Amino acid sequence: MPSGWKDVTFKEVIEVITMTIDEAKQQLQILKADYARVQGDLEKIESIGGNVRPVTRQLKQLEDEIQVARQTVNELEQ
């Protein structure tokens, strides 16, 4: 154990872990909201016959980020 850890209490460690779980869950919610917003943008662009390629790339990127965020939350909760 690193020498700086000797003064850290169990309660402090739990608080940091809990904060991290909460932050990961919050990040997941933000990503989901972004996905819904971009999906709406895609529908609008499609309805006017615009170029959807950049938006579909953005959706794919958000899907990947959401997957990573879900994995992070699941790992932290175990």
Image: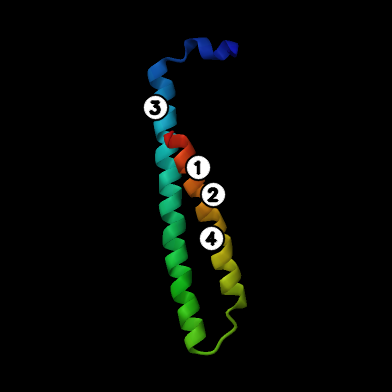
Q: Can you tell which quarter of the image residue 11 is in?
A: top left
Query: Looking at the image, is 54 positioned above or below residue 50?
Result: above
The residue under label 2 is: 68
Identify which amino acid the numbered label 4 is placed on: Leu
Q: CA distance from mark 1 to mark 3?
A: 17 Å
The residue under label 1 is: 72
Proximity of marks 4 and 2: CB atoms separated by less than 8 Å: no
Residue located farthest toward the bottom when viewing the structure as drawn: 48
Identify which amino acid the numbered label 2 is placed on: Val
Residue 23: % across, % down: 43, 42
Mark 4 Cα shell of 10 Å, populated few (<14), some (14-19), many (≥20):
some
The residue under label 4 is: 62
The residue under label 3 is: 15
Residue 38: % across, % down: 48, 70
Q: Can you tell which quarter of the image residue 59 is in?
A: bottom right
Residue 58: % across, % down: 57, 67
Q: CA distance from mark 2 to mark 3?
A: 23 Å
Q: Where residue 60 is drawn, which disc sits there?
A: none
Identify which amino acid the numbered label 1 is placed on: Thr
Identify which amino acid the numbered label 3 is placed on: Glu
